Amino acid sequence: MRSSYENFLRRLCQYRVYLNLTQEETGNKLGITQSQFSKMELGKVIVPNKALALLSAMGWDINFLFTGKKSHASVSELGILVDGEGQDYRKLLGIIALFLEQGIEKCADQVSLEARCEIEILKRRAEGGASESVLYEIRKIAGIAQIPMAEKLGVNIKKYRMLEKKQTAPDAELLLRIYEVTGCKPSLLLDNGHVEKMIIDELWGQLTLPVQKEILALAKQVDCFFKM
C-alpha cells in the first residue's frame, strides 16, 4: 500500500512540474504555505480530501494521480439530458446507463472494473439511490457489509460509518485504498460535482465516434418521448 501511495506522490510532483508550477504557487492556490505543500508532496503529511477537490476544480487529472491512467472524460450532450430530477429523469438515466454499458462492451475488449463500477452507480441512482453517498453505493455494488469493508480499508467501524455518511472525508491514502478494493475512481469521492454527469462524461470518452453518435441519437429519442 505504501508503495502505491509513493507512486501517487511521485505523480503529484510530476504533474505539478508538468504544469510549470512551483510548490509555493501550488500552495497558494490551495490556501496553504509552500512548506505545508512540500510536506504533502514528500509524504510527511497525507494529502487531504479538500486539497484534492481544489486541485480537481483547477483542472488537475485527479484519477491519473492515483491510477497512472489518464482520464477519458469528454463533455457529452448526454450530461445535459440527465440534468434534472423526478421519475422521468431516473428512467432516462437508467436507459442511458444501459446504452453506455452496451457501448463500452462494443468498444472495449474487456470492460474495466472502473467502468463496471461507474455503470452500476448510474443504475443505482436511476433506481432512486442518488441520496446515498458514493461510498455506500460502491459497497452495496461490491456486496460487502460495513465491518468487512472497514477491515479492507484499514479503518475502524466508527470511522467507516462516518465516511459513508459523509461526516468525514477520505484523505488521499484512504481514497487509494478504496480504489484498490472497489475500482471506484477517487474523483467520484471528492464531492465536487454532479456524480452522474461526471460518470457519463468519463464513460463517453471511452466510446468510438460512431458509437457515440448512435447512443446520442437513441438517448435524444427517449428524452423526446418523456417530454411528450
Image (tube, helix red, strand yellow):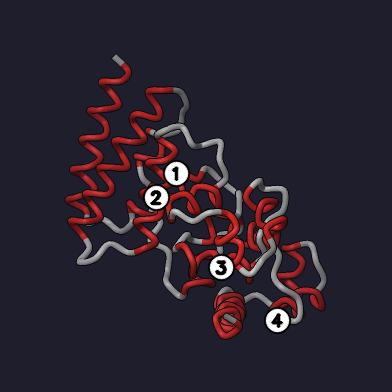
The disc, 3 or 4, on the residue closer to the chain's N-terminal end is 4
Amino acid type, label 3: Lys
- Residue 13 lies, in percent from the top left, at 61, 80
Task: Indicate the secondary structure of the residue bearing disc 3.
Answer: helix
* Image quadrant containing the N terminus: bottom right
Tell whether 172 sits left or right of 81: right
The disc, 1 or 4, on the residue closer to the chain's N-terminal end is 4
* Image quadrant containing the C terminus: top left
Q: Residue, x 30% and y 39% (percent of image)?
A: 96
In this rendering, does residue 43 appear at all? yes
Please tell me which residue lies in front, 129 or 140: 140
Residue 122 badge: none
Q: Quadrant of residue 207?
A: bottom left
Gap between marks 3 and 2, in whole Å?
30 Å
Q: Are marks 2 and 1 in contact (CB under 8 Å)?
A: yes
Amino acid type, label 4: Gly
Residue annotated with mark 4: 43
Residue annotated with mark 1: 197
Residue annotated with mark 3: 152
Q: Residue, x 23% and y 42% (percent of image)?
A: 215
Amino acid type, label 1: Lys
**Which numbered mark, 2 or 4, is in the foreground of this view?**
4
Q: Are marks 3 and 2 in contact (CB under 8 Å)?
A: no
Please tell me which residue lies in front, 225 or 217: 225
**Which numbered mark, 1 or 3, is in the foreground of this view?**
3
Q: Residue furthest top?
A: 228
Q: Residue, x 49% and y 56% (percent of image)?
A: 144
**Which numbered mark, 1 or 4, is in the foreground of this view?**
4
Q: Are marks 1 and 4 in contact (CB under 8 Å)?
A: no
Gap between marks 2 and 1, in whole Å?
6 Å
Task: Indicate the secondary structure of the residue bearing disc 2.
Answer: helix
Q: Quadrant of residue 114?
A: bottom left
